[in-house]
Image (cartoon, rainbow, N blue to C red):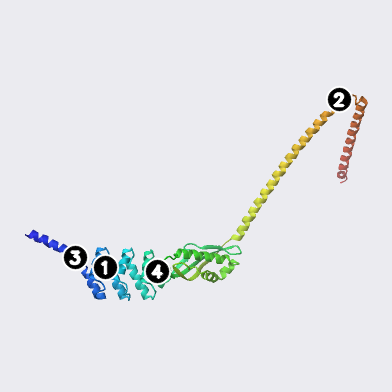
Amino acid sequence: MPVVQMFMLGVIVFIVLTILYFVPIGMWIQGIVSLGLGRIRIIDLIRMRLRKISPRLVTDGVINLHKAGLPHISTDMLETHYLAGGNVLNIVSALIAASKANIQLPFETATAIDLAGRDVKEAVATSVYPKVIDAPVKGTLAAVAKDGIEVKARARVTVRTNIPGLVGGATDDTVIARVGEGIVSAIGSSQTYSAVLENPDAISRAVLDKGLDAGTAFEILSIDIADLDVGKNIGASLQADQAEADLRVAQAKAETRRAMAVAEEQEMTARTQEMRAKVVEAEAEVPKAMAQAFRDGNMGIMDYYKMENIKSDTTMRDAIAGTDSDSDDDDPLEGN
């Protein structure tokens, strides 16, 4: 008999605990005390248990929103967002913070931002308290003024969240890239590097006037140049490189002309040798022609001697002429 009673007692306790789990009477009473009768129904809490939704999370969220002056948000709305994979706690905190800061943040917009993967709570906080972004995040931006001097710059961009632009808007990486591009463009349009160093505010105004925050999730409040340094003389380096390149081109052209001259000289030498060979060949035909003339009777022995005398006279005159020429060349040297 005691065993049966213990078994029955265990069954009763199990049934009571199961009922208390699926029927959170404590949360229902808390909802009635905080919101009044009818705002949170016991059937809603049971349905949450069956759908594996935390009743405590939804109940606390509705109570907090009601106390913050947002009674239009119901348990069904929070349940739907929870089932969609959203962060109910972040949504509740963001809506309360936006309401206190007089920021227009509809529930639909907040849930869309949260489901898009953005931290809606941080977005509201950034709208209230703007944040500062370094451009670039590390190091400095290098740009070249029109006089060829490199200028290195670093900027600090103050932004606040543009809540309507959070869905589909570009992130802070895009803002950093656009600001960097604007700074490089502003420095590049400056006549001298000294003008950039003397008036860095001109760069800030030029970049800010371009509306770089269009299509982003942020609104740019200010762009401040935090650091300016003078870098290398890029213009002079480029001119030196160009001069070196021109020198190499000129040397290559000169080497080409020299090679062509050497080739032409070799060709002329070869032609000279060829002509000499032809002369020697022609001279070798003279004795043959003379012998043929003797055989044919066209040339006699006296004609031969006359020709030899003419050759001897020509050789003597050439020798005399060469001696006189050498004497004339030596006289001026002797006179000196």
Q: What residue is at 79 percent from the left and 34 percent from the top? A: 276
Q: Which residue is mark 3?
A: 19
Q: Closer to the observer: label 1 or label 3?
A: 3
Q: Nearer the viewer, residue 272 or 33?
A: 33
Q: Earlier in the sequence, mark 1 or mark 4?
A: 1
Quadrant of res 11: bottom left
Q: Nearer the viewer, residue 217 or 143?
A: 217
Q: What residue is at 89 percent from the left and 39 percent from the top? A: 324
Q: Which residue is mark 2?
A: 292
Q: x, y percentage for residue 60?
A: 28, 70
Quadrant of res 147: bottom right
Secondary structure type for disc 3: helix
Q: Residues within 10 Å of mark 3 (few under 14, many from 20)?
A: few
Q: Earlier in the sequence, mark 1 or mark 3?
A: 3
Residue 261 visible within the image: yes
Q: CA distance from mark 2 to mark 1?
A: 140 Å
**Vertical position of residue 327 compared to residue 207: above or below:** above
Q: Earlier in the sequence, mark 2 or mark 1?
A: 1
Q: CA distance from mark 2 to mark 4?
A: 122 Å
Q: x, y percentage for residue 113?
A: 38, 66
Q: Which residue is mark 4?
A: 123
Q: CA distance from mark 3 to mark 2?
A: 150 Å
| Residue type beneath disc 2 | Gln
Q: What residue is at 61 percent from the left and 58 percent from the top? A: 238
Secondary structure type for disc 4: helix
- Disc assigned to residue 191: none
Q: x, y percentage for residue 169?
A: 44, 66
Q: Residues within 10 Å of mark 1 (few under 14, many from 20)?
A: few
- Left or right of 159 on screen, residue 65: left
Q: Earlier in the sequence, mark 4 or mark 3?
A: 3
Find out whether the residues at labels 4 and 3 contact each other: C-beta distance under 8 Å: no
